Amino acid sequence: MKIQNIVKYIREHTDADDFICSIREDNSHETRFAQNGITQHISGPKLQISLQLSFGTKSGSCRVNQADEATLGFLIKTATDIACLAPEDPEHMASSGPAELPRVENCAPATMNLQPKDMVDIVQKSIDKAIAMDAMVSGMCEKHLVKSWLFTKNGFEGSNESSSFGHSMTLKKGEVETKVSYEAKDYAPFNLEEEFSRLSSQATALASMQDFDAQKIAVILRPEALQELIWYMSWMMNRRQSDEGFTAFTGQLGQQFMGEKFSLYSTLKQKSLSASPYSPEGLPSRETTWIENGLLKNMPANRYWAQKVGCNPLHIFNLYIPGGESTEEEMMKMVPRGLIINRFWYIRTVDMKAGELTGMTRDGVLYFEDGKVRHAVNNLRFNEIPHDMTRRILALGTEKLASPAMIVPTALIDSFNFVDKTSF
């Protein structure tokens, strides 16, 4: 059933006061490999239809994965039955009406045209390179094409088509294990030679690992590491939670809350970034300055809270952190000693009100001294407050695409707080 027919059916078969209908079609290919062998290729389309119905301020929702009339009838009936049983919602908002949406290009031709045989070839070349260095490689090569639509009873209509390509490799050689990953909306810039060279160099560096105690020390956070901390920080920037006193951002709007070298934007102007033209609430995406030279200028807020406190509703649809011109070599000469961090993982909130996170390093930690890398060290656990960390930025490198929705630079941070060693 065509998309317009699905919406027409819902309009004609419900007597709800309001509705929001979200439809998503996925077409994915995933080639998995492990220990130098291809193990699985998964492919096929998926459909998801979500419907929220409202009767006054009482709402109910349901989700199905087929579009025949019997299933759509079940979808409407189930959402209606739930709404009838639901309590009144004091924060109920009528659905969004018609809106002018930005024109975005989230689909890359090179990704759309990538064939399964091409993906298998990428994987086989990865395996051949691992065998040549007497190592084993595992990972996944993946391609995703997504079409999505949002319709409301009040007249909002939005659609978006996006692509993404990813290739991850975990290399194991002896006791050394390390990983690299590439993820972007566009397959065209992907270079397997560069990615495997990065993987190989990480493995070579880790072969000369030495014991290192947790301490406060300068770090060079590569883009993949920095982005993971900033995503968590942006989640804690929520306007409502902050207005209600639950985050470190409480009372900081309009204040010089972060370091002067740090700015953060959501943008439609960076062609390599994916940017949905609208939010799940039907809010058009627009150029937004969240932080500029350390000044907290805006915070994400949904429609209900924005109406309550009298601000513009805003949402984060991607993140862009402008960088500088410092190279890693130059950064290593700016401090007597420090660590280079490739990635973090297992990041969790320690204290929401303080904005404190904990987590561990992964995929290789390098120790440098007197401007030169000396050796690798063991993984470490950190306890850090990202907004406070931005005040300790000593230098920024050129920004790069770290994921389909985030561009960030390399950053030299003073006195990063490591609290313990880890055994893996």
Image (cartoon, rainbow, N blue to C red):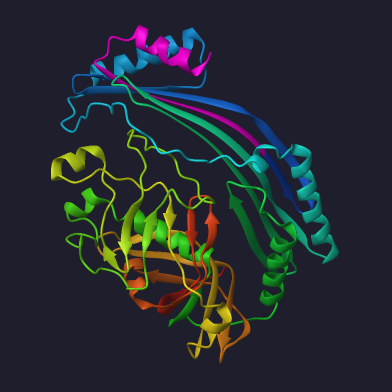
Instruction: Specify whether residue 20 is painted magenta.
Output: yes
| Residue 197 % position (x, y) | 73, 66
Q: Is residue 30 visible?
A: yes
| Residue 300 % position (x, y) | 29, 49
Residues in magenta, as a range: 1-29
Q: Is residue 308 above or below residue 363?
A: above
Instruction: Specify whether residue 382 is painted magenta.
Output: no
Quarter of the image for the C terminus: give it.
bottom right
Q: Count the marks: how many? A: 0
Q: Is residue 275 above or below residue 133?
A: above
Q: Which of the 4 image quadrants contains residue 126? A: bottom right
Report the residue at 75% width, 69% height from top. Answer: 174
Report the residue at 77% width, 43% height from top. Answer: 118
Depth check: give the residue in front, 420 or 360. 360
| Residue 380 % position (x, y) | 50, 73
Report the residue at 54% width, 58% height from top. Answer: 401
Does 79 sit left or right of 180 as displayed? left
| Residue 122 % position (x, y) | 76, 49
Q: Which of the 4 image quadrants contains residue 258? A: bottom left
Depth check: give the residue in front, 421 or 110. 110
Q: Is residue 212 visible?
A: no
Depth check: give the residue in front, 421 or 149. 149
